Amino acid sequence: MAASLSFSGDSLAAHFSDIPVSDAPVGRFAPTPAQQAVIEFSRKLGFGNGFIRNFGALTLMKLRRAPIDYDYAGLTLRFYPARCGSARHMLLSPAWSEPKERAFIIEKTPADGVFLDLGVNVGFYLFYVAAKRPRATVVGFEPAPEYHALVSFNIAQNNLANAFVMKAALSDKAGVATFNLDGQSLVYGSGGVEVETIPLFDALRARGLDRVDCMKIDIEGVEDRALMPFFRSAPRSLWPKAMIIEDSRHLWGEDVLAFMTANGYREAWRTKLNVALTLA
């Protein structure tokens, strides 16, 4: 079994795709003692290693083919760890995954501030901020139907009154487009479904937001489609004061980072994938 799965994310997802999604209240799938031991071992001694995460997810599903309800940043969330890499990060290595990015976001989001999560996936950032900044307004965008439903479920189960996730893809115009589930992108990947698209400025106005303290954006290569129309149409008072963006300029039609640094943003630091910026 282990050799055939190779502990890869794709193999895990394929092998455990038959696990049904449940809307039973959180707590119904509390881990067994054996599952809890696997989770805590990975959290404490896994050092964020991807092989250990995948092996842990495989072990959890072999112990019981069901979702798992467990703690993340003080919230109790429902996880499907075999289906999604972000879920494995949240469940099996939360302290080791992107700590610099999380610390930056919490530093830049005041207690009553506004945080935007563009490309929520299953909520690695959204739930972290909602837990650490319970009075802040937390707004996410996630077009993938399965992920949107799970995030909405976890928001409701934790009574997060100030958190909301919109089922839409951010783009340069309102309408309907094909969202590729395999690449999690409007442009790249396959296995498409039709989703609503909305410009970021329109979405913020619809929510009645007049400021953005911090934003994280990772929308798999179409960051330019979301951000360039926003910067050209939104008042500067609405520009995010701080931002984490995945550097995907090799996929962009316009260089968002070059525009930002030419228009008042300063690079605070960068990692292999992400760039942190602040607005002067």
Image (tube, rainbow, N blue to C red):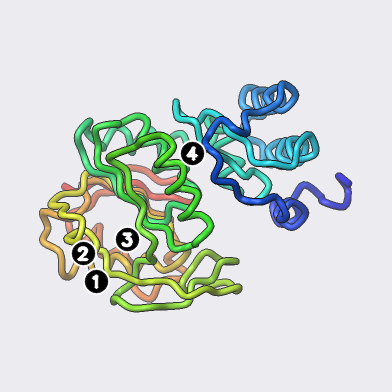
Q: Which mark is residue 194?
A: none
Q: In front: mark 3 or mark 4?
A: 4
The residue drawn where x is 63% and y is 29% is 47
Give the image location of residue 81, x and y in percent: 64, 43
What secondary structure is found at the residue carrying circle 1?
helix
Q: Number of numbered discs present?
A: 4
Q: Give the distance between the C-alpha atoms of the residues marked 4 and 2, in whole angstroms.
A: 28 Å
Snapshot quadrant of residue 218: bottom left
Disc 3 target residue = 257
Q: Nearer the viewer, mark 4 or mark 2?
A: 2
Residue 103: image quadrant is top left
Q: Name the residue tied to disc 2.
A: 201
- Which of the two discs, 1 and 2, sits closer to the camera? 2
* Amino acid type indicated by mark 1: Pro
Label 4 crowd bin: few (<14), some (14–19), many (20+), radius 10 Å: some
Residue at mark 1: 229
